[in-house]
Amino acid sequence: MSSTFDVPYMLNVCIAASLEAGRTIAAMREAAGGVQGLIIEEKGALEHKSGAQDFVTEADKKAQYVILSYLRTAFGKALNIVAEEGSMDYQLYYPNGFPRLPWIPIEGAGRALPGLGAVLPEGLPGKPRHEGYLAGVDPARLCVFIDPLDATNEFVRGATDCVMTLVGIALDGQPVGGVCYQPFLGETGTLTWGLVGAGTNLPVSRPAKVGGYAVTMSKTNSALLDHVCAKLQPVTQLRAGGSGFKSLQVIQGNCNVQVAGKGVKLWDLCAPHAILRTLGGALTDIFGREISYTMMSDVSVHSVVATLDCPVEHQQIIKLIAYETDI
């Protein structure tokens, strides 16, 4: 196993892992006769929603295990990983160690994945050729952030439109690669990925910008969201569940601003943030400060603003919001 990593190759492994994890979630739900047939546990109170509980299901845990298995099989223990469901006891699943997964894109033994041509023009199998772009990176500079099942609370309630797996790659604390896979959207699920400096699988022509401000935000009312809507006029609101789903509304051009309040985590943000950066967009905290994605970073972010506009326009929105106190 190489002592350095190639980021485009890592993105390909993350795509394979996300697809398998998403399919695992869908298969577990179907086999259980619906989400209520799955084991559901309470993780505790949500810090940003009064009286609300945070949940984890056995599908969250199995999906995370799938993703970790792919990454550890391909890159070993040298790769830094931060995952929502924490460390997992691999002995519980594979007492004899990691299996060699049959179609993981390991050097010389992989298979091509659809839709990768824009990033990996030579494709797979084998180690992808990418003309040295983000190649030979010291693993200490990299960290992967995993949310195996974003929008678990919506999932528990039976809503699947905003459920997705999120896997983001950070280099020197900045998001550079992201994968969002929605297993319940479309006949075979919907995959969105991006690699900064290389491209995305999104259509070149995206929806035109909406007039005024179309803001996607939590379904839960808060003083922060009231404040934002009062400052951004005229405003249209899209209330939705799932942090990744709301980010995708900006990425896809359905909204031009996302505002997330207290409680958002780095594993919610890294993947969509990378895709936004690939498209020229921006995501900062609500004060306009950059977000750091490292093993040493605090996983909780106060509040964030995401836009598909250039950095200058993003900062103008930050100034319009004029957020100064802990609302």
Image: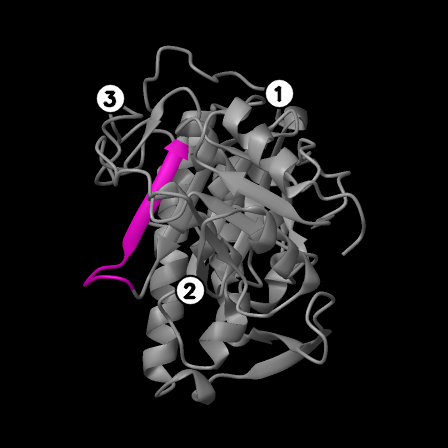
- Find the magenta span and give its range: 185-194
The quarter of the image holding the C terminus is bottom right
Binning the other alpha carbons within 10 Å of mark 2 as few (below 14), some (14 to 19) or many (20 upward) gives many
Q: Which residue carries the number 2 mark?
A: 163
Query: Is label 1 or label 2 in front?
Result: 2
Q: Give the residue drawn at x 69%, y 40%.
A: 322
Residue at the outermost top position: 131
Residue 128 picture location, percent across and down:
33, 24
Q: Give the residue drawn at x 54%, y 31%.
A: 314
Residue 207 is left or right of residue 246, and the answer is left
Binning the other alpha carbons within 10 Å of mark 3 as few (below 14), some (14 to 19) or many (20 upward) gives few
Q: Secondary structure at mark 2?
A: loop
| Kind of residue at badge 3 | Pro
- Which of the 4 image quadrants contains residue 137? top right
Question: Is 192 a magenta residue?
Answer: yes
Residue 47 picture location, percent across and down:
74, 66
Question: Is 288 a magenta residue?
Answer: no
Q: Secondary structure at mark 3?
A: loop
| Kind of residue at badge 1 | Asp
Residue 46 visible to the viewer: yes
Q: Are marks 1 and 2 in contact (CB under 8 Å)?
A: no
Q: Which residue carries the number 3 mark?
A: 121
Q: Give the residue drawn at x 46%, y 54%.
A: 246
- Which of the 4 image quadrants contains residue 312? top right
Residue 77 picture location, percent across and down:
63, 40
CA gap, disc 1 and disc 2: 33 Å
Q: Which residue carries the number 1 mark?
A: 138
Q: Which mark is residue 110?
A: none
Mark 1 or mark 2: whose residue is earlier in sequence: 1
CA gap, disc 1 and disc 3: 24 Å
